[in-house]
Amino acid sequence: MALTTAPDPTRRGPGSDRAHAERRGPGRFRHSEGLAGYVFLSPWLIGLMGVTAIPMLLSLYLSFTNYDILTPFSEVEWVGLANYERMFTADPSYWHAVRVTVTFALIAVPLKLAAALGVALLLNRAWRGVGLFRGLFYLPSLLGGSVALAIVWVNMFNRDGAFNSLLSLFGITGKPWVNDPDWALETLMVLAIWQFGAPMVIFLAGLKQVPTELYEAASVDGANRFRQFRNVTLPMLSPVIFFNLVLETINGFQGFTAAFVLSNGTGGPVDSTLMYTLNLYITGFTDLNMGYASAMAWVFLLAIAVITAIFFSTGRFWVHYSDGEDR
Amino acid sequence: MVTVTPTTTAPTAAPPNARRRPGGRPVLRLLILVAIVAVVLYPLIWMVGTSLKSQEEIVNNVGLLPERFTPGNYTAGWSNFDVSFGRFFLNSAMVSLLTVVGNGLSCLLAAYAFARLRFRLRGMWFAVMIGTLLLPQHVLIVPQYILFRTLGLVGGDWPYLPLLIPQFLATEAFFVFLMVQFMRGVPRELDEAARIDGAGPFGIFRHIILPLSRPALVTTAIFSFIWTWNDFFRQLVFLSQLEDYTVPVALTLFIDSTSQSAVGPMFAMSVLSLLPVFLFFVAFQRMLVEGINTSGIKG
């Protein structure tokens, strides 16, 4: 990805493979090595074909059919663009799922990244306790995606859950948040934000790279802490922010487990947690409408590709690479 | 993908004690951090506390911890269904451990080819591999299900094949990428020395790359295990018989039986299911947190 600094194999000194190959004259590939390359690559190649490429093509074909798992392949009917038409014009629950997913990502991702950056800034000092805090903050990222934690979360925001007993300390009478269509998705957002540790670790690594001289120069120029953050930290950190933003957005769109657990696989209450992937699962594996589910999967893939492309094309306006390398 | 998002950022070359700017208030910051830790840990402590409460305490005592510790939920949850949770744990452990083996082996082979060998179309295949990094598994699940079902592997004699076959074919591009990055840091002079001693590509792999790649293998193993242990989506799709269920799928059975009496056992089994991940966290904390940031680069 954009941030990695892989040693460039072409820039190595004498004795490297490239120099070696050049000494050997025009034949760039030694025969035995080319063969060995494909031997070592063969599991991956078989996987690429069998588990990724062929299924993708199959899915593209199915998206133009009315395939359900019950009828044999020979009786599958080609329906042209009917699935796509239905998706875009005649399926309100599809658009509802899109709205739920976009709402979730638009709110949860920025808040999660803000929490991650805020805590990273608090931790970004060399002192003894950092390791312990960093570890504790990272723990939710390891546990949070599991069914077990989703179960705990749902109960925590239920009528008799810990959240309401906390509220009652302040004299507030809570409600069963997870059963309220206006609040169910918000509890899932809180669960996502709770897992701020993973992007925080990445921010911390990024903060370590900011040269101290820049802060010294800024304070010599009379910049206060806020100006230093605004004019030194943020630009220097922008590649890491960009990386986290892309990754967390793509992850956010794919939220499934917690929504499944909260709604027992239905997307309820009143479709308020019908995330895109949950809708896809219900369409394909509960309603067995696999042709239609395939169409949904392809639109999902294209949407993620477009969003990633937008990120990368707007990135050059605000992502600042200090080493001057053109990436 | 799953929750953890480790990354390979640039090597952290800055000295560890670099930043000591004036103007900080250590005590205030410590207080804020402790408050955040309390918020972050609250759900976990509440989970463990509730799992140790008796049925009536779950209803009446909303506090964090039980007044009387009762382990009854654990025995009740363990045998709550027709199949014991021991079976589910064995299934999960088997799937996770075989995934570790499959990922380690197959990703290492592919990474060696990408990092060290020169062959036709290498650049193109590498670009394809990077392209699959961001491919959501939800996009492939329907056709994969159809393919594996057509091959008679879904609900077959050994229903875990659809979960494991992809893992033995290096489809987890993230680990291939991680290992490629790591191997690029292994000095090529070692290859050259081995080549002069008469080693071919296989010899170099066996005697140089394999032993030196251990840190990358360990990182891959830990994350493979945790991600598979926590994974729900694929296991939900491919496992249909109760006795084949893994822990996450079995846990959702508790949700079906919505009665209040199931809360204690459900929490007890949830705690148990998180225990392996937690133990991994305790044992490999430094590695998990710093792990991929640096281990992909350090020799």
Image (cartoon, rainbow, N blue to C red):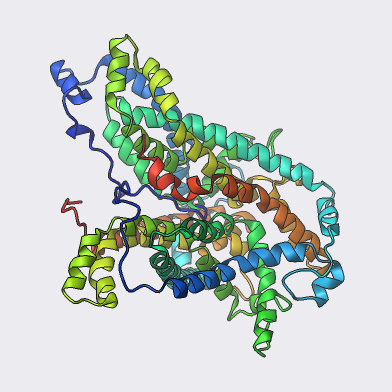
Task: Please report the residue visible at 65 percent of the width from the left and 47 percent of the height from the top.
Answer: B276
Q: Locate residue A244, reporting x and y percent.
A: 38, 59
Q: Quadrant of residue A230?
A: bottom left
Count of numbered labels shown in the rendering? 0
Left or right of B26? Residue A206 is: left
Left or right of A11? Residue A257 is: right
Q: Locate residue A225, reporting x and y percent.
A: 29, 75
Q: Locate residue B67, reporting x and y percent.
A: 82, 70
Q: Locate residue A60, reporting x and y percent.
A: 44, 49
Please determine whether, in this image, residue A215 is positioned above or below residue B284. below
Q: Quadrant of residue A227?
A: bottom left
Q: Nearer the viewer, residue A106 or B290?
A: B290
The answer to whether one can see residue B174 in this image is yes
Task: Please report the residue visible at 41 percent of the width from the left and 27 percent of the height from the top.
Answer: B212
Task: Please report the residue visible at 67 percent of the width from the left and 85 percent of the height from the top.
Answer: A169
The answer to whether one can see residue A316 in this image is no
Left or right of B121? Residue B64 is: right
Task: Please report the residue visible at 56 percent of the width from the left and 73 percent of the height from the top.
Answer: A185
